[in-house]
Structure formats: structure tokens, C-alpha cells
Amino acid sequence: FLDNPTAANHATMRVCVFGSSSKETPKAYLEASYELGKLIAKDGHTLITGGGLYGCMGALNDGCSNNGGRAEGVIHKMWCSEDEDINEKHNKLAKIIKVDGSNLSKRKAELLRDADAFIAMPGGLGTLDELFEVMCERQLNMNPRPCVIVNLDGYYDGILQQMKRSTLDKITWMPITQLAFVARNVEEALDHVVNAHKINKNNEHADVKASDEDLSNSNKKTSNNKGKEVESTKTTEEKEEEEKAKGKQQQQEDIKNNKEHLIKACVAARLESLKLQGLGSSGRSSILHKIADALRDNQQKILEVNALDISAAKSMKMTKSMRKRLVLTKQKLEDLQKGIRQIADSQDPIGSMIGSMEVSSSPSSSSSSLPSSSSSSLVLSQKTVPIGVLLIIFESRPDCLPQIASLAIKSGNGLILKGGKEAKHSNAFLHQLITEAVSAGSKGKVGKGIVHLVQTRAEIASLLSLDHHIDLCIPRGSYGLVNFIKSNTKIPVLGHADGMCHVFVDINCDLKMAIRILIDAKLQYPAACNAMETVLLHGGLVANGSAAKILAEMKNAGISLFGSKKAISALEGKYDALEPMDESQGFTCEYGDNRATVHIVEDVAEAMDHINKYGSAHTDAIVTENKQNAEQFLGGVASACVFHNASTRFADGYRFGLGAEVGISTGKIHARGPVGVKGLTTTQWTLISSSKDGHTVTDFAEGKRSYTHKKLPLQ
């Protein structure tokens, strides 16, 4: 044991934190870990870690010790440097327990022994091993100390989902919510363990007082009462088990009731969608105009309600880009009205004939044994129909709700909506306006169940299991949200997980045009998924000095530029204002703000290779005056949207004339790119016989009829 007498010596609570000790730990996790260490020091608690020099462990120790806190480490010999027994960085720790065993079990025992609470940051197998042991203690009621999982960027989503599944499958009887508290950030994590520790301490004091009273009463009893004491103790234990069983049963009952409620909502949405289709195109358009009128007439009230969400968001530790998406403005509401009216006045997407074919005509042979009354044709047609019931899950942006609802109504679909809790007031009020407009616009023929709003996050897991009731899921949000949904449902998913958009500036570009497009693509709305994240500059632009001019103008406009090693090397002495890019994220960093990555490529072919390797198949553009290079780029980049001499910000349903979009699809099946009203339809085949006796395959097999497969004009 090594003690550092110069370190702070206060220990309100001993907080043990698990996490990564890897040098490759992402920057976001390092920053969060440092902040947690700082908060622990600020509140006067003691930090206990595995003593690692790098990753979350190193950042935690630095955050605590650099801010006057007491940090203790339980380290294994493998984490000490070869030249010295204890690394210089370890000297910052107030206390070190050095374990020199052949395995790590001794270290883990020391790590868990004296802690009052546990917090798990993102980490590897070692972190999971320690986390599961603590949760196991809680399940068995063995020293059940507070345990928190910090789920940064959805890092633990997969494990949490598996824990939920194991409870539903009755493999474990205690739900994850009782095993550990799931926090979104380190502030929430520390607040929870502090509060839980206080409660535990109060319970301990109550137990001590009760024990003293029991002991006093016990001394007055005769030996004949010992059997009754044992019986009393046993009865208490049995009551505790009964309470646990009741709690478990109640939780399962809640899950069941919640799922049944959602099934009813899906069934209602499907029934109302059939009524909606029966209104015809003019009836659905009338509803949409009512929705646009409601947005116009209630503009001030909408902004007042939205202000409640904006105010609440200040305490949610949201990113700047997410907070920006949350804000509604008069201009946004006016654009919404225009978009919805554009959808209302657009061509009816339902019942549109895609193709028609004569499969067979009247028998021409005089030797045909078919009766003359059967001398008629068989016609096959393909037309558009609604998909059915849609589940749309979106984050932050409340303006998504009326857009999505309008597209669903125009295409005759039922809709289940789940918005982010950060916009709960705005979403609830907009949903109310829309359902009232549906009722008014249809004169009561279509009920409010056509659009159902889900308010709680807990309902998502149940919704994702309803593959027999929901026909398509479209997630709109972060990488973590989209990938979680794709991994946890059998419902077909339409959407994109990233918005890694590029602009390639060719050697044959118009310099002023290139600068205009680059600034617009990045700054017009940096938080959007179609905003540019990476600038690819032709190597020739470096040689002729144009690259330096382009980058200088971008910086003057307010864009923070981060260069690859190749870019910084190539521009040395010509433009030295590039900051090094974060190598841990490489070329896949989606900033969502005014930052952009700069890289140098030698030609169009290398630009295409880079985009196809690191892009997300969303939207990419080339700026060039060379027609051949433009055509090569447009044909060789495998993205949903590929532009020539235009900003990536044009990849939008409204700008494409779709009125609005339900999302952007980067897949290659069904809809692709901005998904408008047509993307919410599928097709249906109709086969119509005009024969009195009908058509049978046997007639064709026996040669009584023959196939013509003649294409017919669309009507």
C-alpha cells in the first residue's frame, strides 16, 4: 500500500468507476471521464479506479487529482512501466494497492471491496466483468450498493436490450432497472449514486435503531420464546420474498398492459387508414389544408409551447446541434404550411397505374373447345397502394411531426409516432392540432386514432416487437438510435444512420463557385444530415495556390477546419491554419456543427474511392467545369444523391418538390434519397378476367388458351 500524504483526504463517499484503459478510447469518452473525475473531486468524494494510465481510467484519475480530489488505484504489475516500479502518473494517486498476482481476480476483489457506489463508463471485457459482478450482488441482495451505467452515445444499448430480454424470458428475475440505473451523462450518474447512498445510509440508521429495540425486547424474553423469535424472523424473510415476487409480477403485468395498449393503437390506426383511403384524393387533401390552417392560426401558441421545451433543454446537457433542431420559428412554421399545402395539391399517390398487360386474349382457333361465352381477355395490372401502418421514431425536431403526419395522410397510411422527450410539449400540442384537423377535415368520418403519439421511451421496445401490426419503421435521429432499432426489430426499417456528406473540388473548378457552395453546404444549417462534413480538394489546387484561398475564405466565414496528415503536409507553408483531425474517428466524423475535415486527393477517381469508402451513401457533390469529370463522378459515387455544382443542402424533400420528407433513405431497396409521399406506397397486382366462365391455368396447360403478354397503354 502506498499513501500520498499530500493528496486531499476527504471521503464523503467512495465511488468506484470502471471503464476503458485503452489508448484508442474515443475523445468524447475521455472528456466525459475527466469531467466525472472533476465532479467527484468537487463534491469531496474519493475516486477508486483500476489505476490505468490511459483511456477512461487515466482521464478519471487526471480529472480528480488535477482538481484537488482524492483518487485511489488498484493496479496490476502489467500497468507499471518497465523502467520504474510505479509510473510517474501513478504518483498523483493518493493511495495505490499494487497487485502482483498471476491473475486479476485479486485486483477485482480489492477494487470492489470498500466502495460505496459504482459507475460504469464505456469499456471492454474487464469493465463488463466488474459491472456484472456488482449487479449480481444486487440481484442476490448481497451488499446491494448503488450501480450506474453511463450509456454515452448508446454504448451499452445492446447489453441493456439483452438484459431486458433475459428478464422477459425468465432467465433472470430482477429487471435491469433494479440492477443498475442507466444515466445519459456523468452528471446524472453522480447525482444518482449520491442520492442512493444517502437513502442507504438512512436505511442503515433505521435498521440499527430497530435492531437495538429488538435486542432490548429480546433480553426481557425467556428461553421459551426463542422458537417464536425464529418463527418471526422467518416470517419477515418470507414477506420480503413475497414483496419481491409481487414487484416482479407487477412489472410483467405493466409490460403486458403496455403492449396490449400499443396493439390497440396499431389496430385503430389500420382501421382509420381504411376510412381515410375511402375519402378519395379530394377528401385527404381537405384534411391537409385543415392541418396547414391550424398551424397558421395557432402559430403564437405553438411558439409558446416550444419555448417550454427550449427552456427544459438547457438542463439536459444536449449538444448545440440537437438544441438547434429543437427550436421552432415563424419561418419554419410558414415553410411547414407551404410544404403541407404542396402535398395536399400534389397528384394522388394511391391507385396510380404502373403497368398493364393483356395476359391472354380471346381464343382465335376455330378448334377451341371453349364455349363462345368464354371468348374474353385476362388483364394484369399493377397499381400503387398504401403500405399500411407506419412507425416513425424521431429525435429533437418537432417540425418533423406535422411533416410526417401529412405525408402519411396523403398516402392513406395509419401512423404511430414516437418523438424525443426533449420536444414533448411541442409534439403533444402539434399532435392535438393535427388530430383535431383530421376530424374536422373529414367531417368526423376519420377518427383521431389515425395518428397515435407515443410519449415514453419505455414503449419503444414493445413497439419494435409488433411486427405483425406495424408494416414499416422509419427512424430519424442519431447513429445510435438508428442502429439500435435495426438490431432490435423484425419490422422492415427504412432510413439512414449517418450523414457523412462530401464536396469534391476539382482542379477545373470555378473558384468563386466552389467557395460559395462549400460555405453553403457547411453553414446554411450545420446540424442537418445533408450538411457537408468533409472537403476533398484536388492536389492541383494546392500547387496553384487555389486551395489556400478556398480554405481562407471558409475560415473567414466561420468554419473550423481540421486537416488529415496528408492535407497538413501538402499545405505546409501555404496554409498553416489547419488543426489536426481526430485520428481516432478518422474520416467518419459527423460533426453536426461548423467544423469540417479537409483532405487532399489526386484526381476524380481517388475522390470517388474515398467517398465510397468513408461516406454514408447520403449526399455527395462535385464542383467542376469539366463535363467528363462530372459525369464520371455522378456515375461512380454510390450515394442516394449525387450533385454537380450544387450544395449538398439541396437533398431535402421540400427542395425536391416532394412537399416534405419522412426521412432520407440510403438503402437501395424501395425508396431512396428524400422519401416523400410516393415512398410511403407499395404496389398491388390485380388480375381481371372478363370471361363469363373465368380463367384457369388448366385451360393454358391443355392448350385451350394461349398467353399473349401484350403491353397495354396506361389509362
Image (cartoon, helix red, strand yellow):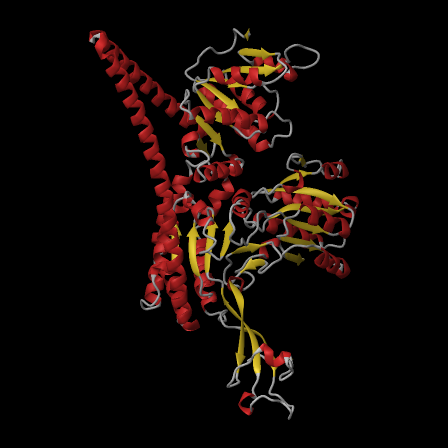
Taking the image as shown, residue 82 lies to the left or right of residue 244, namely: right
Q: Position of residue 627 (x, y in %)?
A: 75, 61
Residue at x-position 65% and y-position 45%: 534
- Decide: is 424 above or below 213: below
Quarter of the rendering containing residue 170? top left
Residue 523 percent location from the top left of the image: 57, 48
Comparing 142 with 633, the one in front is 142
| Position of 615 relative to 673 (above/below) | above
Note whether 361 is above or below 58 in the view shown: below
| In the image, residue 628 above or below residue 689 | above
Instruction: Give the percent coordinates (x, y) of residue 99.
Output: 59, 12
Q: Residue furthest bottom?
A: 366
- Asked if one can make out residue 480 in the rendered structure from this viewpoint, the answer is yes
Q: Position of residue 418 (x, y in %)?
A: 43, 50
Q: Quadrant of residue 562?
A: top right
Regarding residue 289, the answer to whether it shows in the image is no
Q: Between residues 231 and 415, which one lies in front from this camera angle?
A: 231
